[in-house]
Image (cartoon, helix red, strand yellow):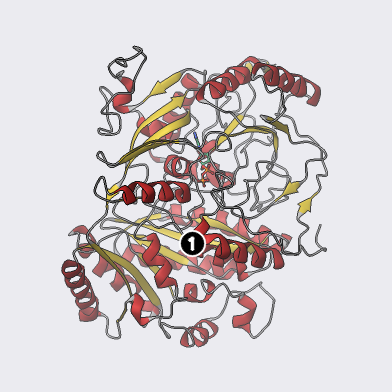
Amino acid sequence: MAGNTTRADSKPVPTLNETYNGAPPRLQDEATEKRDKLAAMRTLPKNIQRKRGLQPPPGMTADVFLAAIDELRAELKDTDNTLIQVNGSGIDLVDGWYLDRPATTHDAFHIADPEALVSSASIYPRSTADVQTIVRWANRHLTKSGDRVRGIPLYPISLGRNLGYGGAAPRVPGGVVLDLGRNMHQILDLDGANASCVVEPGVSYFALYEAVQKLNNTKAHHPLWIDTPDLGGGSVLGNAVDRGVGYTPYGDHFGNHCGMEVVLPDGSLLRTGMGALPGPPNGTDNSETDNPAWQSFQHSFGPSIDGLFSQSSMGIVTKMGFQLMPAPPAHQSYCLTFPNEDDFSTIVEVIRPLAQRGVVGNIPQLRHVVQELNITGKPKSLFRGGDTANTSPLTSDEIHAAAKQLPLGDCAWVFYGTQYGTEQSTKDQIAEIEAAFKAVIPGTRLFLPKDVDPSHYLHDRALVCSGVPALRELDWLTWVPNGAHLFFSPIAPTRGKDAETLHNLIKQLHVEYGFDLFPSLCVAGREMHYISNIVYDRGDADAKQRAVRLMRAMIAACAAHGFGEYRTHLLFADQVARTYSWGGQALLKFHETVKDAFDPNGVLAPGRNGVWPRSYRGEGWELGVDDLSLDIIKPKAAKL
Ligand code: ADP
């Protein structure tokens, strides 16, 4: 597989004017440069040829599957063959890069054989009605063995840029990927007065940002912000249903949603929130209207069910409402540096009361100084005197020697924050925060964007923390050739002692398995998301195997101390789900009960987040702490 170097693509990256999932024109040059840089560092071939040909859904022969596909094509009236692609021989596995149309054939950031998680077909519905047709079709084509009955497994994605958590790959090899974004990417409503929007799955943060700017330019309403995660190419809807986060006060994406339209696993349609109550009939033709309060009030009447559609396999979300933040009069980003490694727990202790009292304006990020190195976009070898061996992490001496040369100078930790309010109030808040740290951590230093070179990351942080989607975080990937990453994301209380315990566990295991530790802690008043990003070389089988072992070991070790992940890659979801074992696995049992009631044929994303439908349970699909070889994903005791 290794060998021919991929040459840089000479064409500029397409923009949003050309394609729904393109780069905003303002970032076209930066995107093109990043794509070409990553391509130049790729030693794997651009196209990876399949060894195994078409992998149909489990228990189904290729002929039966292809006949079912023909039937669906006819039903969808796909006369020009644009709505379904069968991913068999002749369709190579192309990892592509972040802003390409997502690779719906496999996980572009493969952590095992690229063919481990392949899809059998990709389907591109044009409408909610198409999605319903596809779900009903999946329920009609059943495989049976004993009392097990199951339909065709569908894996819905919006833009599929969930890289580091499984990308656009289905959990069950041979599953059918429903690529909702390709033909469903309209902003259905942008309401300046209510400060809200309704989007289809294929609307990226880039696209929503551009539309909100246009609205703001009309000056008809108070200007609005969107909230964006670190990278702006993801789906607004997809990120929210996966409970992703951003960095303005509206950073809890699922928390700030307001109303969903969902296709259930039997093909029926549901609206959550006030959308469950029809609006008054349209005055002109008496047609149905949306409830006027759908994007105003998140709940409806009776038990709340919205959460059932986040990180779940209970429904396919085809429309989703979000509330948008009124732009504050002023905002100011800054960073504070701290000199010593063991300042860590004190930093956390200082943040807690400041965050609880709302003095800290957003969810700040606390990063180790090693991340000042990788965010330069320079390869690790450069900080190692040109040595390309990647089997050991940079030493503390190497990190500090390199940090000395960078704009923030030598330090151990960097706190990136943003304040919102008036110019005066942001100034006062920053002064209060700086004083609180300086009182207990001698050597604390404050930097504002004006204090650092325009290429410094603080400027990109200032964009993201004011709702301007960016691409800077792609620079991590140039750390090693064929760069890919895998997230490990446990939650801990915002307490110095817990932070230290968690950090030490993770640090020691990174050393053991030979990876640099890149911790970013998103620290709120009561909890912290500890996000460790394992950057590995997709062309290095040993590095991939070590990454798998590291993930397995961290999940187990952290759970033993009470720390659980908020989100994980597809292949680690079973292990994570089973760490939430309180009350004899009461939570998982509840999830399974709901799944069985909603989806008796197990058609919708079987195995997602560790929840297997009845027709898969007991066959050994679950992957646990001992499943270290992930090159072939198959049930351990398959009967079908
Ligand atoms: P992004 O492009 O924002 O990273 P994805 O489209 O990859 O987001 O979505 C993240 C995950 O959320 C997917 O892997 C899938 O499991 C789930 N998901 C995405 N879109 C939907 C949807 N419309 N309905 C149900 N689940 C979805």
Is residue 612 or residue 465 the one in the foreground?
465
Q: Position of residue 207 (x, y in %)?
A: 47, 47
Please determine whether, in this image, residue 301 is positioned above or below residue 223.
above
Please determine whether, in this image, residue 174 is positioned above or below residue 408.
above
- Quadrant in the rendering for residue 369: bottom left
Residue at (39% x, 30% y) in the render: 260
Q: What residue would you read off at disc 1?
A: 532
* Residue 520 visible: yes
How packed is label 1: few (under 14 Cα within 10 Å), some, or many (20 or more)?
many
Quadrant that contains the N terminus: bottom right
Please determine whether, in this image, residue 552 is positioned above or below residue 240.
below
Q: Position of residue 374 (x, y in %)?
A: 53, 72
Is residue 300 or residue 455 the one in the foreground?
455
Residue at (20% x, 59% y) in the render: 358
Amino acid residing under circle 1 = Ser
Residue at (47% x, 36% y) in the render: 186
Q: Is residue 499 left or right of residue 470?
A: left
Q: Position of residue 558 (x, y in %)?
A: 45, 56
Mark 1 secondary-structure assignment: strand
* Residue 244 visible: no
Residue at (62% x, 38% y) in the render: 170
Instruction: Count the marks.
Output: 1
